[in-house]
Image: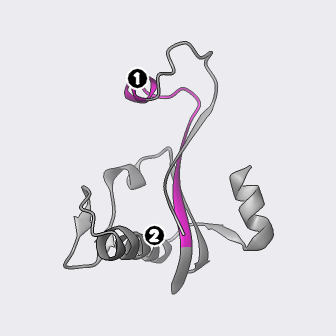
């Protein structure tokens, strides 16, 4: 739903190539590393990028707006048919019926 609304204003792309993923990692760093001066696992100050292990997991999708040369926004979506136990615990999903879950994170524009 959110992606559908965003797509009305600007195209949303799925990062399929290493170049697109690297552009997202550099954009993240520009926000979290430079602007907000935050330090997260995966921050590489020397290379100016923020990549995390979750980015490479099979359930993860990286989306972005703009182009690989000029990313204007990004988010990571992790989508499960059945979320793993640690996510069930983290999000207090114990009482929910088994449903497909999309967990959106690292959203920035």
Q: Position of residue 103 (x, y in %)?
A: 53, 41
As drawn, the label of residue 44 is none
User: What residue lies at 56% left-to-right and 77% top-to-bottom?
Assistant: 72
Quadrant the C terminus occupies: bottom right
Residue 35 pos. (x, y %): 35, 75
> Is there any visible trace of residue 52 in the rendered image?
yes
Identify the secondary structure beneath mark 2: helix
Q: Position of residue 79 (x, y in %)?
A: 56, 41
The span shown in magenta is 73-90
User: Which residue is most to the top?
Assistant: 95
Residue bearing the label numbered 2: 21
Q: Nearer the viewer, mark 2 or mark 1?
A: 1
Element type where label 1 sits in the image? helix
Please name the residue shown 50% across and 15% down the image: 94
Q: Is residue 68 visible?
A: no
Residue lying farthest to the left in this orientation: 46
Task: Report if residue 103 lies within the magenta region.
Answer: no
Using the image, tell me which numbered label, if any, was put on residue 89. 1
Front residue of 41/53: it is 41
Q: Residues within 10 Å of mark 2 (few under 14, many from 20)?
A: some
Q: Nearer the viewer, residue 62 or 19?
A: 62
């Amino acid at each position: 739903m959110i992606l559908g609304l965003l797509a009305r204003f600007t195209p949303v792309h799925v990062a399929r190539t290493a170049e697109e993923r690297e552009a997202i990692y550099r954009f993240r760093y520009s926000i979290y590393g430079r602007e907000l001066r935050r330090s997260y696992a995966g921050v590489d100050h020397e290379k100016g990028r923020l990549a995390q292990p979750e980015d490479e997991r099979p359930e993860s999708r990286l989306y972005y707006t703009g182009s690989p040369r000029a990313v204007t926004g990004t988010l990571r979506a992790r989508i499960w048919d059945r979320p793993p136990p640690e996510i069930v615990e983290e999000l207090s999903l114990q009482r929910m019926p088994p449903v497909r879950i999309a967990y959106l994170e690292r959203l920035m524009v």
